[in-house]
């Protein structure tokens, strides 16, 4: 019905979910559930992969993006939905081996894009997550 209120999050430009800032697993799960189409499945797999590799990971949603970090040591990974891909952000990406392929305006940050229909290279992602979680994190 017109004017009927829903509890479904608003999708911002490019289809990124608008999720209130929050800490813990709840805001992350709300973000993942609101990721449009195929992106939600990728979000669930990324979240599970991080938890498998970094069991004591700390989670938050800030600036409408999930963040993963180590308590007291900052954030090592974030992601964000765009119209045609999900952008993974490794805040100390230039220290990873291999270095993620997409450069950033920020010297140490590197990106990795996941597009619809591409096979998810979990071995590569797991290596990056493992390495990134052991580096000093980004303070935000």
Image (cartoon, grey):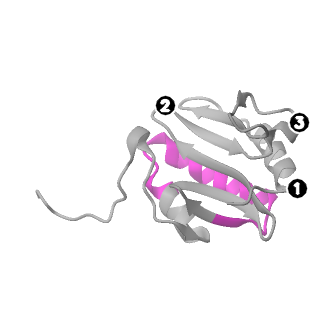
Residue 63: horizontal and vertical position, in percent? 53, 56
Q: Secondary structure at mark 1?
A: loop
Asked if labels 1 and 3 touch by Cβ distance under 8 angstroms, the answer is: no
The C terminus lies in quadrant: bottom right
Badge 3, how many Cα within 10 Å: few under 14, some, many 20+? few
Q: For mark 1, does the 10 Å Cα neighbourhood hold few (<14), some (14 to 19), or many (20 or more) residues?
A: few
The structure residue drawn at horizontal position 50% and vertical position 58%, both measured from the top left corner, is 31
Distance of mark 1 from mark 2, alpha carbons?
Answer: 30 Å
Residue 104 falls left or right of residue 40: right
Residue 105 point in image, percent of width and height: 68, 34
Q: What label sits on residue 97 in the rendered view?
A: 3
Pointer 2 local density, CA inside 10 Å: few below 14, some 14–19, many at least 20: few
**Above or below: residue 106 compared with residue 53:** above
Helix, strand or loop at mark 2: loop
Comparing 139 with 115, the one in front is 139
In the rendering, which numbered label is found on residue 84?
Answer: 2
Residue drawn where x is 26% and y is 63% of the image: 6
Q: Position of residue 53 (x, y in %)?
A: 80, 57
50 relative position to 118: left or right: right
Give the residue displayed 45% in from the left and 34% down from the top. 83
Kindly report the distance in space between the C-alpha atoms of the residues bearing marks 2 and 3. Answer: 26 Å
Please report the bounds of the magenta region as a residue range.
32-59
Which residue carries the number 1 mark? 134
Q: Is residue 45 magenta?
A: yes
Magenta run includes residue 39: yes
- The location of residue 35, given as percent across then percent down, is 46, 49
């Amino acid at each position: 019905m017109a004017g009927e209120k829903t509890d479904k999050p608003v999708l911002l430009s490019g289809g990124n979910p608008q999720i209130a800032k929050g800490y813990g697993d709840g805001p992350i799960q709300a973000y993942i559930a609101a990721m449009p189409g195929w992106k939600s499945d990728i979000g669930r797999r990324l979240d599970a992969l991080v938890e498998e590799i970094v069991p004591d990971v700390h989670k938050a949603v800030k600036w409408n993006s999930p963040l993963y970090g180590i308590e007291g040591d900052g954030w090592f990974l974030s992601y964000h939905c765009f119209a045609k891909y999900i952008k993974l952000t490794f805040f100390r990406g230039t220290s990873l081996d291999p270095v993620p392929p997409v450069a950033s305006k920020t010297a140490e940050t590197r990106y990795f894009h996941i597009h619809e229909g591409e096979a998810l290279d979990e071995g590569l992602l797991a290596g990056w997550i493992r390495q990134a979680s052991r580096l000093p994190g980004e303070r935000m």
